[in-house]
Image: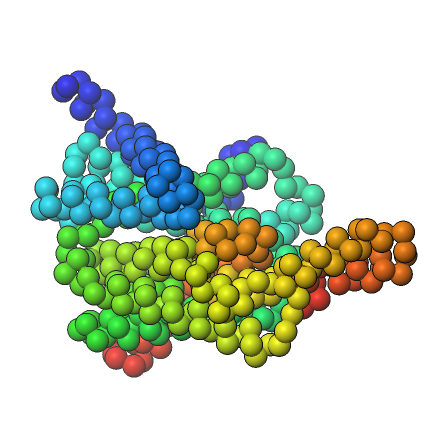
Amino acid sequence: MTISGVALLAICTLLGSYLGDLLGIVLGVKANVGGVGIAMMLLIAARLWLVKQDRLSQGLKLGVEFWGALYIPIVVAMAAQQDVVSALSGGPVVLLAGFGAVILCFAVVALIGRVSGPTETMDEIEAREREAAASHLDPGVQTGTDASRNPARRQA
Amino acid sequence: MELITHALTANSLLTAFAAVGLIMWLSNAMSKRLTFGRIHGSAIAIILGLVLAFLGGISTHGQHGVADWPVLSGIGLMGGGMLRDFAIVATAFEVDVVRARKAGAIGALALLLGTTLPFILGVGIAEAFGYRDAVSLTTIGAGAVTYIVGPVTGAALGASSPVIAISIATGVFKAVLVMIGTPFVAGVIRLNNPRSAMVFGGLMGTVSGVAGGLAATDRRLVPYGALTATFHTGLGCLVAPSILYFAIRALVGA
């Protein structure tokens, strides 16, 4: 049922909002502390449980995924109702913070890449796979490729 | 004419759906025709949204952008806190925990740095421009993480609308810079392998920025970057209004 997906999403969001408020009171601030993040974790947990129980139906998925697909349009609507006129008085903050954050993150990507040593580039991986495909009759080459085919798995 | 206005205002949420749909359609067309897909349609749509909010603010002297036009009041409901949180939580449904494990320790490290470093920078710049209260500082810092984490944090902490608008604009500007800039720096930062793509996704965050930037660099890298980037928003929404806010409050007082 589609409504069960929508209801599941609503329950997770409501619970997250409640727990976030509760956490705020416990910590002595007048704010919702991480409610959206808590709700997301609840939804991920619910999904894992449903998969395990084999009860993740198409309808349920549709009910949740429909709202997920509307996320960008809703963000556009959110942007369209902000007090942009007042915000423009703080213009340089936007430019500096945006630009600085990007430069900083690019630098850290380069740093992590250098610190963690050399790795196979996408071109090398594809070249190796082509080679392996060409000599797929040789079982020795085949197993060697399979073990290292997925670069993500090697790092896990 | 009056009949049309009545139909639009009486069904304000439907009017909002139609209006935002029109903006999205226009933005995607602009993305394809004018930027050849280099700048994601979603980023253009958000910028258009901010521009419209500016025009709305000028013409109505209100504080709610286009939502102050009676015909478009439904935008207030569609983009309000309730539906926004609802839709953001829904995106977590697509997070694949098994695939997440593949990203491993290096992905987690990248995510952690990708949240804290832009945040600290954003807070520092906001501080330099005269913001002194913990709520505003945290909201602008969160905007430097992504354009979602910013407003979610601002709404949770009760920040003012101008501050939230600054934080959205910062995040959108960052996403656009990532989309445009990535192909140019790809060589320097060695963005040519799955591992660095995953690090890149975790550090940059915004899924649209990462997907757009990597697509313009090397399409084969997109899934690796998107894998870590999808966790970015969830992590940011969790830590920015909590741990990071408390850290800032401890530093500057309430």
Image x and y of residue B85, in percent = 39, 50
Colour pattern: rainbow
Residue B112: where, in percent of width, then height? 48, 71
In depth, the one of B26 and B82 nearer the eye is B26
Q: Residue at x 17, y 73 (%)?
A: B130
Answer with left or right where residue A39 lies relative to residue B77.
right
Residue B215 relative to residue A139: left or right: left
Q: Is residue B50 visible?
A: yes
- Identify the residue at the far bottom of this view: B251
- The relative height of residue B139 versus residue B36 in the rendered view (above or below) is below
Q: Nearer the viewer, residue A2 or B177?
A: B177
Task: Provide residue B40's location: percent of width, then percent of height.
Answer: 41, 47
The image quadrant where one finds the N terminus of chain B is top left
Image quadrant where residue A77 sits: top left
**In this orientation, does residue B86 appear?**
no
Kindly identify the residue that appears in the image at 27 percent across and 44 percent down: B48
> What residue is shown at x 89% (from left), y 61% (from top)?
A140
Q: Residue at x 60, y 76 (%)?
A: A116
Residue nearest the observer in this picture, A93 or A116: A116
Residue A43 placement (x, y as % from top left): 53, 51
The one of B229 and B179 positioned closer to us in this rendering: B179
Among the 4 quarters of the image, the one containing residue A16: bottom left
Q: Quadrant of the C terminus of chain B?
A: bottom left
Instruction: Count the numbered circles shown.
Output: 0
Left or right: residue A57 versus residue B125 is right
Instruction: Name the side, left or right, on which A83 lies relative to A24.
Output: left
Q: Quadrant of residue A21?
A: bottom left
